[in-house]
Amino acid sequence: MVKNIYIFRMSYPGYPPAGAYPPSAGGYPPSAGGYPPSAPGSNPWGASSYPPANPPPIGLENIGNYANQFNPEYMSGMASNLSGTFGGANVPPSMYPQAPGGYPSVPPGGFGPPPQGQQASFGGYPPSGMPSYPSYPGGPMPPPGQQPQPVPYPGQQPMPSFPPGAPVNPSVPSYPGPATPMINPGASGHRGTIHDAPSFDPLRDAEVLRKAMKGFGTDEQAIIDCLGSRSNKQRQQIILSFKTAYGKDLIKDLKSELSGNFERAILAMMKTPIMFDVHEIKDAIKGAGTDEACLIEILASRSNDHIREISRAYKTEFKKTLEEAIRSDTSGHFQRLLISLAQGNRDESTNVNMSLVQSDAQALYAAGENRLGTDESKFNAILCARSRAHLRAVFSEYQRMCNRDIEKSISREMSGDLESGMLAVVKCIKNTPAFFAERLYKAMKGAGTKDRTLIRIMVSRSEVDLLDIRQEYKRMYGKSLYTDITGDTSGDYRKILLKLCGGND
């Protein structure tokens, strides 16, 4: 009860009585030498009498009694201190200087206007000597997940470089040596010999083709010059424009005017890449015999997306799935290989896990060289499912471990179509252009020419990697693809193939 009375008395005006806090020479706070006190062991917030144990409340009725505590000299010193701390170029020599006459003028580099060329910010921030970040928009945004890099402030020393940190996953070493996985040149789509023609006009081309086939005789050279200089996408537009302009089917007109291998090559060029492969697979399966090499070539060399499109188009075109067609015409482990490839489900990652690489290399060795007989299923599972980058590493590790390359092991362990299929997969993984260079060479080698293979490769790779195939051909056989085509074909058929070839090496 006494305590409540004491609090009640504290709220009276005029309290505390005059003289309760004697004034000091320097004003507020009452300590010799100003604020803070310099006497060792003294109260860090002032003299022993400050602050009082029970400070009175500050209210409207007694604020006038404490006006003398807001000493102008003390406030001036505080302002000067803040200016020096947050960017002032001329920091006062003492920690809390006296600045008679009110607030000091703004020092250079302090809370004034920003330097010329610098974006204004609240309070002149950032202070001198601190890094600033580029403004966005205006500068390029950093990649997702990356912090903006500091831009040195005028006069700032460059930041020191620090050594790189430890790898994120040190347990998985990077893939070393000359057999580092390479990007398949055909994957980029920019190593072909045929490109979009500039200033393309499908109606004008349709008129050129109409005149070349109209009347008595056919101007084959005009057809070669026109269609051999257009991309497949542009040829599809020509087909549509021809029907729009003349109400006739360009494909039917070409069939009626052309013949032989020249006709086959031109008609192959007029199909889309997907439909061309669909019909090549259909022709390889139908009839008494099966062109297993054609099936292997297409399914081993095409991308996942391309194979899936082939499957969809095959079902639409022939009312039968691609897998059903393969099952009806093949058998055994070769059938399983083709069905696995026809799924278009190969891993497409580019990461190489060396522990898995070693495991797969050992599994292949155990499935073939290191046992009596061969576990074809293990070869099938690894060669058809693993990524290209991973398999290149596996082949290199297999060579190191067994002192024999994977192709020789396959040839020792397998035979017939299964051997050809497995070898085709390995060769496509290692070097796709070299695989096609070998196919072209074998198609022209000897007495006869395998024109179907020659046409299929020249047409299907003309917008993908035919430039790389030409280079591999010259490296492997010592003469140019152009030269061998010239010596092995003739007439308009030779002309269109050389047009697709794109030049001599």
Image (tube, grey):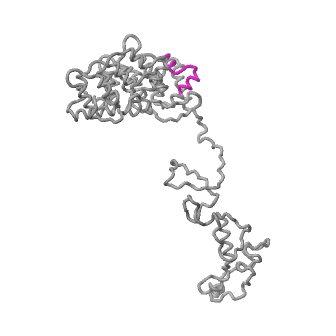
For the record, the magenta segment spans 394-412
| Residue 76 visible in this rendered orientation of the protein | yes
Q: Quadrant of residue 242?
A: top left
**Residue 119 in the image, given as x and y percentages of width and height:** 54, 60
Which quadrant of the rendered structure holds the N terminus? Answer: bottom right
The residue depicted at 70 percent of the width and 79 percent of the height is: 28
Q: Is residue 387 above or below residue 444?
A: below
Q: Quadrant of residue 459?
A: top left
Which quadrant of the rendered structure holds the C terminus? Answer: top left
| Residue 418 visible in this rendered orientation of the protein | no
- Nearest the viewer among 319 and 228 is 228
Q: Is residue 160 magenta?
A: no
**Residue 342 in the image, given as x and y percentages of width and height:** 38, 29
Q: Taken as a whole, is the magenta stretch helix, strand or loop?
A: helix
**Residue 183 in the image, given as x and y percentages of width and height:** 49, 31
Q: Is residue 401 magenta?
A: yes
The residue depicted at 51 percent of the width and 20 percent of the height is: 368
**Residue 15 in the image, given as x and y percentages of width and height:** 66, 87
Q: Is residue 234 above or below residue 50?
A: above
- Nearest the viewer among 415 and 472 is 472
